[in-house]
Image (tube, helix red, strand yellow):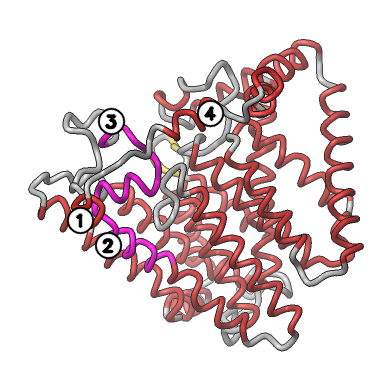
């Protein structure tokens, strides 16, 4: 029961979907947590202890510092375009709510806090994938999901293929988050050792892959990075090769069986619409000999020459002049940030993002066994490399709330397991 409650809290915060009256699910998570603290007053001491940790306090404080710097560019350029502040204030609120629920997760955690926190994140995306699958197969269920979305988002469903997730942003944000999930998933499998190919793990992986079909192709990039984590890990070559063969064999069989068991009308939707969308690059290569998609074609036009002054100082604009679209009609991550505040602004963004990574890296360097040290550092490196790559398509580094929340939960679990003195002073069953 406590695990289900923890999963619910994390689901509500990461996906932050619309709820009538309350407005946002993250606010509901905050309300539920407040009730928990009221019922268990001693948990408040754990909250104070958690929030006072330098690593945890540094995240919102650094983000607040970044927010204070953001207005400088539009003021300097006299554009007074402060539209960028809204998503960063939202991120700050979500980070604070995440810190607010962390003590509850820690108190209710299993013996290995890091492994348990990975499990929570994996479970959250497994549930989201199930929601997408049911919404795709059952139109009434899809209508229920759309009830918890903004009307303009629900209308962008691409004929029933997208906007099926219970989240505030079911497009790039969700697909990029799914990509990070796969790296976390492979790390979770790695930490389990001999149980890597248990029936439950295989089922979770298969369901998440199907969920990614609806979230967006960007998520599949994470599978490649997850495989890199497996291939370059400190394990025998036989284990690595065997694991890769087993993963793709089991995945192919599982998805094949699922497709064959689908009702005829759903089968036609999958074959005629879902697969061509998810594997557009494969269809493009078969038909025209080029590995391209509509997204890659559009992305290639979103990077263009700019002046050296813009490169250094930006133009101080985030939205178009009439406020109806992105400045210079580009939503590519590096380009948007350079156009707004130049290369120095991007440097500030990277400094904020590195606050998440520095302490876990230092702790990993001091782990006793060389293999543990190597595997953990490899994991952190691959996570950061993935973020750098996906940032080419859209704003991720220091920006995407879903990924920042996932990082904060994951790294807090890591530090709680291997560095912090025990935070959870009170057992979960103590009143």
Image position, residue 159 (x, y; %): 56, 16
Disc on the earlier residue, 3 or 1: 1
Image position, residue 218 (x, y; %): 57, 40
Q: Residue at x 46, y 61 (%)?
A: 34
Disc on the earlier residue, 4 or 1: 4
Q: Which mark is residue 344?
A: 2
Q: Quadrant of residue 349?
A: bottom left
Q: CA distance from mark 3 to mark 4?
A: 21 Å
Compare residues 208 and 426 and report the one nearer the observer. Answer: 208
Q: Which mark is residue 325?
A: 3
Disc on the earlier residue, 2 or 3: 3
Q: CA distance from mark 2 to mark 4?
A: 36 Å
In what element is the residue under mark 1? Answer: helix
Disc on the earlier residue, 1 or 2: 1
Compare residues 389 and 209 and report the one nearer the observer. Answer: 389
Q: CA distance from mark 2 to mark 3?
A: 24 Å
Residue at the disc numbered 4: 163
Disc on the earlier residue, 3 or 4: 4
Residue at the disc numbered 1: 313
Residue 328 sits inside the magenta stretch: yes
Where 195 sits versus 88, above or below? below
Sort mark 3 into few (<14), some (14-19) or many (20+) by Cα contacts within 10 Å. Answer: few
Q: Residue at x 68, y 22 (%)?
A: 283
Q: Residue at x 21, y 62 (%)?
A: 69
Tag 3 and tag 1, C-beta contact below 8 Å? no
In what element is the residue under mark 2? Answer: helix
Q: CA distance from mark 3 to mark 1?
A: 21 Å
Span highlighted in magenta in the image: 327-353
């Amino acid at each position: 029961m406590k695990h289900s409650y923890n999963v619910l809290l994390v689901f509500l915060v990461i996906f932050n979907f619309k709820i009538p009256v309350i407005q946002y699910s993250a606010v509901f998570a905050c309300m539920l947590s407040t009730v928990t603290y009221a019922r268990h007053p001693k948990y408040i001491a754990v909250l104070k202890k958690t929030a006072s940790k330098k690593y945890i306090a540094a995240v919102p404080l650094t983000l607040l510092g970044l927010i204070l710097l953001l207005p400088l560019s539009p003021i300097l350029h006299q554009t007074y375009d402060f539209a960028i502040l809204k998503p960063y204030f939202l991120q700050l609120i979500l980070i604070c709510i995440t810190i607010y629920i962390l003590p509850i997760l820690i108190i209710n955690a299993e013996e290995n806090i890091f492994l348990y926190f990975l499990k929570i994140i994996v479970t959250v995306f497994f549930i989201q994938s199930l929601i997408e699958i049911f919404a795709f197969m059952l139109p009434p269920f899809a209508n229920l999901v759309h009830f918890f979305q903004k009307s303009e988002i629900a209308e962008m469903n691409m004929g029933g293929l997208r906007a099926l997730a219970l989240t505030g942003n079911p497009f790039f944000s969700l697909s990029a988050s799914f990509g990070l999930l796969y790296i976390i998933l492979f790390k979770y499998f790695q930490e389990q050792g001999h149980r890597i190919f248990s029936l439950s793990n295989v089922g979770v992986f298969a369901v998440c892959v199907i969920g990614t079909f609806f979230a967006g192709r960007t998520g599949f990039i994470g599978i490649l990075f997850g495989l890199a984590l497996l291939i370059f890990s400190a394990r025998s070559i036989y284990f690595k090769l065997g694991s890769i063969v087993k993963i793709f064999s089991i995945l192919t069989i599982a998805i094949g069986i699922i497709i064959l068991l689908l009702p005829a009308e759903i089968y036609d939707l999958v074959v005629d619409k879902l697969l061509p969308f998810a594997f557009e690059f494969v269809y493009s290569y078969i038909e025209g000999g080029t590995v391209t998609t509509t997204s890659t074609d559009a992305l290639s036009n979103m990077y263009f020459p700019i002046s050296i002054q813009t490169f250094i100082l930006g133009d101080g604009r985030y939205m178009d002049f009439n406020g109806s679209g992105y400045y210079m009609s580009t939503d590519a991550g590096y380009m948007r940030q350079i156009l707004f505040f130049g290369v120095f602004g991007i440097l500030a963004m990277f400094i904020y993002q590195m606050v998440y990574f520095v302490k876990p890296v230092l702790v990993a360097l001091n782990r006793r066994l060389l293999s543990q040290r190597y595997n953990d550092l490899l994991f952190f490196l691959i996570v950061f490399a993935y973020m750098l790559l996906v940032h080419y398509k859209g704003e991720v580094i220091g920006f995407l709330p879903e990924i920042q929340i996932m990082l904060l939960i994951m790294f807090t679990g890591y530090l709680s397991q291997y560095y912090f003195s025990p935070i959870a002073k009170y057992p979960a069953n103590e009143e």
